[in-house]
Amino acid sequence: MFNFRRLLALLILISSVVLTTVIYRHLQQQSPKELLSMLPENIDLALSDLHYTQSEDGRRRWTLDADTAEYERDSGLAKLTAVRLLFYEAGQFGDISLQAEQGQLAQETRQVDVWGNVIIVTDRGEKLFTERLHYDDQIRQLSTEEPVRFLSPDLELTGTGLQIDIDQGRMLVKDKVRVLLYPAVEEKK
């Protein structure tokens, strides 16, 4: 039995050395140029679990999170997946959270475009649904030309085109507006 253990230990040691040698030789056969050629074209930097906070005068204005980001230096654009935005102090809306499947951040202008199941939720429990949305940080405004659906405890609103002024807490639906008001529910005493 003692000889069997020694034989087994020797086989494990030899197998480990052979495996290490094969992996080392394989990695040395690929030049750095070959490894770089496997990366996507035009991508200068790729990140996972991106967290970006935009501040002004020491106060947070908004935070952007994404599962992945691919930055292209020439265009100054970062392509994003699984986007989450949080806008702070949005007037009467309170904080506004936004999520979307994909997006794009223009670094210089701090403009964000998102698309794919865009959902906005306010601190007051209101929800807005659309397929595409644009955020302009210069004027702190969200906008779209797509159909929108807005839900609150008091009403359901649908329409096409939207502008939300974050600082003023105002929302404008541009066209084909339909509103369904829900009756107030009286509490029983």
Image (cartoon, grey):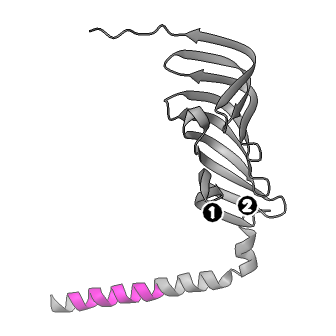
Looking at the image, how many numbered discs can be counted on the residues?
2
Q: Quadrant of the N terminus?
A: bottom left
Along the horizontal axis of the image, is 57 left or right of 108? left
Near-viewer residue (22 or 49): 49
Counting from the top left corner in percent of width and height, residue 39 is at 71, 66
Residues in magenta, as a range: 5-18
Which label was assigned to residue 189?
none
Residue that carries the numbered disc 2 in the rendered image: 71
Disc 2 vs disc 1: Cβ atoms closer than 8 Å? yes
Residue that carries the numbered disc 1 in the rendered image: 47
Q: Secondary structure at mark 2?
A: strand
Which residue type does callout 2 highlight?
Answer: Tyr
Near-viewer residue (89 or 150): 89
- Magenta region includes residue 80: no
Q: Quadrant of the C terminus?
A: top left
How crowded pointer 1 is (Cα within 10 Å; few <14, some 14-19, many 20+) is rated as some
Counting from the top left corner in percent of width and height, residue 60 is at 59, 54
26 in relation to 43, above or below: below
Counting from the top left corner in percent of width and height, residue 46 is at 67, 63
Work out how far the residue at label 2 is from the one at label 1, CA to CA, in angstroms: 8 Å
Near-viewer residue (7 or 72): 72
Q: Secondary structure at mark 1?
A: strand
Q: Quadrant of residue 117?
A: top right
Counting from the top left corner in percent of width and height, residue 8 is at 28, 85
